[in-house]
Image (spheres, rainbow, N blue to C red):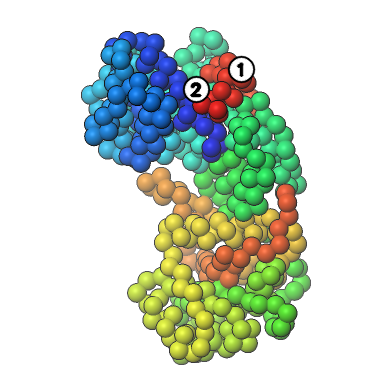
């Protein structure tokens, strides 16, 4: 089951497992997820559904049914936690975030002699192992038809289409009817399209390639000169500091509409001159400075600028905070209703070259291409300048077999469950 966020896929499969446990005395079932907190979500939802009819032992993470059936709840963070069980049915919640070795080495052998069923419940996570598994399942269905042991179900959170950069309502027969369209519109306005397609439409999106789309549309072509400050506006400045190999980049935008009004990029100068140039720009525009304060030097740099009278917001770049920062900028570039970026060749080049990369461990990171001559200083500076600012915004494939769901009313019953 590949569905958008809040589709209630966990509820759907949990309900089916409970019904199977009641219908098959003395049977064993296993509920799994990538980490303990995910497993706990499924268990707590089952506890609410079963009330006092089923005996839940939270310390052992088990549920005992009156007819002798049992459901075990186990995390796959350490796959051996689930090893050794026999199960007539296994549910893998958030399957796209699980280690594939946990499935192939532990879960799959579990149903060899029981003829049991395995349910994969997930929202996509790039083109990872779940994409490969689904393609294999679809090929098997196409070859064997009703004799295939696979079933594939896909549904978005709510039926919508993206047309010319705008969101259009397109009802889907198996959408969650209790999700307001206005909520989906808000997500579309504040998320990069790539993330929206993955999280809401449950589409597989490549985990490599350019992070920023519609860059050219966001540029005020021909406008390369810094604009003087205007007392009608307030300003925010993003600064990525470097001294030798990389560049220090100063970017200033108007808070009201994100219009970029100032750009400066330099290196090979003393720290004193770097601080003075940042302070001069901040004072000229009366701008708040959002500074890349990553590393041991970050605190010292922040304090040095404060001593020069600059209002500083330090921003420490970790894997997660950088993702949040870049995703915010990507959403602004994609959805801003009018061009707002200066026509700076180096900045434009960095935006277009900034890419998703998959690490050996399977995680996704965003960065400039590896190699001499590639930088991301302009991207980081611009992202910091737009930090927490939203500006003006606009409002806004093939069908798979669906043997799991018998009717629309069946799905609606799950949403009400």
Name the front one of labels 1 and 2. Answer: 1
Q: What element carries label 1?
A: loop
Residue 248 appears in the figure: no
Whole-percent x, y for residue 10 in the image: 46, 31
Seen in the picture, residue 360 relative to 174 is either above or below; the reply is below
Whole-percent x, y for residue 99 in the image: 36, 37
The answer to which of 201 and 207 lies nearer the viewer is 201
The residue that mark 2 highlights is: 137
Whole-percent x, y for residue 41 in the image: 39, 36
For label 1, count other residues whose C-alpha is less than 10 Å away and answer few (under 14), some (14-19) or many (20+). Answer: few
The residue that mark 1 highlights is: 407
Residue 299 as seen in the image, left or right of residue 259: left
Residue at the image point whose x is 36% and y is 35% from the top: 39
Q: Indicate the quadrant where residue 307 lies.
A: bottom left
Whole-percent x, y for residue 202 in the image: 57, 36
The answer to which of 327 and 19 lies nearer the viewer is 19
Residue at the image point whose x is 30% and y is 27% from the top: 56
Residue at the image point whose x is 36% and y is 32% from the top: 43
Seen in the picture, residue 15 relative to 75 is either above or below; the reply is above
Residue 59 appears in the figure: yes
Q: Residue 398 carries which label?
A: none
The answer to which of 407 and 205 lies nearer the viewer is 407
Seen in the picture, residue 25 relative to 213 is either above or below; the reply is above
Residue at the image point whose x is 39% and y is 24% from the top: 50
Q: Mark 1 touching mark 2, by CB under 8 A?
A: no
For label 2, count other residues whose C-alpha is less than 10 Å away and answer few (under 14), some (14-19) or many (20+). Answer: some
Disc on the earlier residue, 1 or 2: 2
């Amino acid at each position: 089951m590949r569905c958008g966020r809040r589709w209630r896929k966990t509820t759907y499969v949990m309900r089916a497992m409970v019904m199977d446990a009641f219908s098959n005395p003395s049977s064993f079932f296993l509920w799994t997820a990538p980490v303990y907190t995910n497993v706990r979500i499924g268990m707590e939802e089952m506890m609410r559904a079963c009330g006092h009819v089923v005996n839940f032992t939270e310390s052992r993470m088990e549920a005992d049914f009156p007819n002798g059936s049992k459901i075990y709840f186990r995390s796959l963070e350490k796959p051996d936690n689930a090893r050794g069980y026999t199960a007539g049915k296994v549910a893998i919640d958030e399957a796209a975030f699980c280690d594939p070795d946990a499935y192939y080495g532990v879960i799959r052998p579990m149903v060899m002699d029981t003829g049991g069923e395995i349910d994969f419940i997930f929202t996509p996570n790039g083109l990872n192992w779940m994409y490969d598994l689904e393609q294999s399942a679809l090929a098997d269905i196409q070859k064997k038809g009703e004799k295939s042991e696979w079933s594939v179900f896909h549904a978005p959170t709510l039926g919508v289409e993206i047309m010319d950069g705008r969101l259009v309502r397109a009802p889907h027969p198996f959408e969650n009817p209790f999700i307001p369209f206005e909520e989906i519109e808000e997500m579309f306005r504040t998320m990069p399209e790539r993330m929206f397609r993955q999280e809401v439409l449950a589409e597989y999106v490549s985990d490599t390639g350019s992070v920023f789309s519609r860059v050219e549309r966001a540029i005020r072509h021909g406008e390369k000169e810094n604009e003087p400050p205007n007392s009608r506006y307030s300003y925010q400045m993003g600064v990525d500091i470097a001294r030798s190999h990389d560049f220090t980049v100063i970017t200033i935008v108007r808070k009201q509409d994100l219009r970029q009004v100032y750009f400066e990029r330099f290196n090979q100068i003393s720290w004193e001159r770097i601080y003075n140039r940042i302070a001069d720009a901040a004072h000229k525009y009366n701008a708040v400075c959002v500074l890349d304060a990553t590393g041991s030097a970050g605190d010292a740099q922040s304090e040095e600028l404060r001593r020069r009278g600059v209002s500083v917001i330090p921003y420490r770049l970790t894997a997660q905070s950088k993702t949040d920062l870049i995703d915010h900028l990507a959403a602004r570039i994609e959805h801003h209703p009018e061009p707002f970026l200066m026509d700076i060749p180096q900045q434009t080049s960095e935006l277009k070259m900034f890419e998703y990369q998959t690490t050996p461990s399977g995680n996704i990171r965003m960065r400039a291409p590896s190699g001499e001559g590639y930088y991301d200083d302009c991207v980081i500076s611009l992202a910091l300048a737009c930090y927490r600012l939203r500006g003006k915004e606009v409002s806004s494939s093939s069908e798979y077999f669906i043997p799991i769901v018998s009717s629309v009313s069946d799905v609606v019953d799950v949403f009400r469950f």
